[in-house]
Amino acid sequence: MTGSQPGSPARSGLDRLRGRALPKNHDARTIAALAANPGCARRALLDGAGVDKQRIAAHAGYPAPFGQSQFAIARGNAFEAQVKEGGGAQLLTLLREHIGLDLSEVGYADLNDIGGNDQREVRHRHTVHLLTAADQPSRTLLDHPLLRLRVGGRQAYLEPDLIALRLDGTIHVIEIKSFAVIDGQADGGKVAAAAIQSAVYVRALRDLMAEAGGDPAAVSNRTILVAPKDFSSQPTATSLDVRRQLGVLDRQLSRIAGIEDLLSHYPATLTFDLDPDAGGRPRRPAAELTAAIKQVGANYAPECLATCELCFLCRDEAGGSTGALGKQVREDLGGIEYTAAALALARGQLPPPDRAEIAAQLLRAAQLREQVLGEEV
């Protein structure tokens, strides 16, 4: 479970940070991105408040183009439709190999056409019923199920590609991606992104089971990634163990749930409000907004370029630091903060640093992270 939710004082503080803008709704991709850099206070605070990071980054002068190309979206939709065609005929063969699903009796339920006054809530209730009711088939594929996950005191609605139920009651998340698996290997970054996104669905499913009085452990740690094989459209499947991703995700969600502690480190005047005019156009000076953003410490790494809308602003701010070259580089340099200092040491232009002082600095930094973000020292 994700822990307690922000109380009224924290909710008021988060509303102040966001200003007059409506909170941005999270989806599986944005929740997965929360876990990509769990040591970043800036990301935790802005996402906890539901701030539209893409909009404030653009107004501050650091727009970051996010989202897939129309070609990639069309390719992904076509591959998913192919895998699901005929009640998931191709998929069933893969599931027999990976989770031992008996093909003799398999139900298929598509929840996409369920309507009502509040379609999302109706679909969610129907998903809960299909996953928990005793009278439901024990072997079933759920297409377009709808889950919920609480992030920063608000419910985010999530739609996995598929959920498979096995005879013994085990529930498996199935993630369909259009990137190729060539000679049994796929792009490591894309697989990692699929793993953390699958972990989001696993967490939401476990919360659903717990709330419905079921067994959260029925949701498997091993999710199934389906992708094209080699240079064809023939699907292949592999298992992903997402236990590590679940741990990171749970810690980040807990920090957002306990956002009061993080808020207390910043002045009550801090806000990211764009001060829109009657036409919705921001009136706030870009420099003033940038100064407000920089009041909250960031933890920039090159990986942020693929996961965070504020990446260009934070990269510019981190210029000259060893952290901007990647976490591994900074660790290899023993905590040296700036590349200029590292180069000067390598050239013999600076005396060797005092090891005891470096250790003390690293310990103080770790203690501060633990205090602000809840990271273990």
Image (cartoon, rainbow, N blue to C red):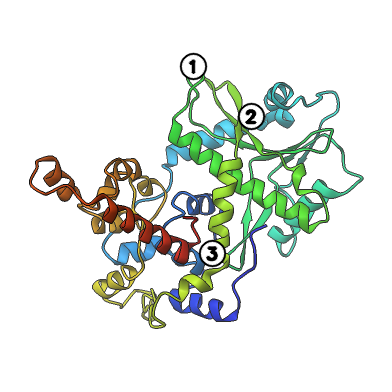
Q: Residue at x 22, y 53 (%)?
A: 319
Q: Earlier in the sequence, mark 1 or mark 2?
A: 2
How many C-alpha atoms fall within 10 Å of the one at disc 3: few (<14), some, or many (≥20)? Answer: many
| Residue 14 in view of the camera | yes
The image's mark for residue 83 is 2
Which mark is in front, 1 or 3? 3
The residue that mark 3 highlights is 256
Q: Residue at x 50, y 61 (%)?
A: 374
The secondary structure type at the circle numbered 3 is helix
Q: Is residue 36 left or right of residue 297?
A: right
How many C-alpha atoms fall within 10 Å of the one at disc 1: few (<14), some, or many (≥20)? Answer: few
The secondary structure type at the circle numbered 1 is loop
Q: Are marks 1 and 2 in contact (CB under 8 Å)?
A: no
Report the label total.
3
44, 244: nearer the viewer: 244
Q: Residue at x 55, y 37 (%)?
A: 77
Q: Is residue 186 left or right of residue 136?
A: left
Residue type beneath disc 1: Asp
Q: Quadrant of the N terminus?
A: bottom right
| Residue 63 in view of the camera | no
Disc 1 and disc 3: Cα gap in Å? 40 Å
The residue that mark 1 highlights is 183
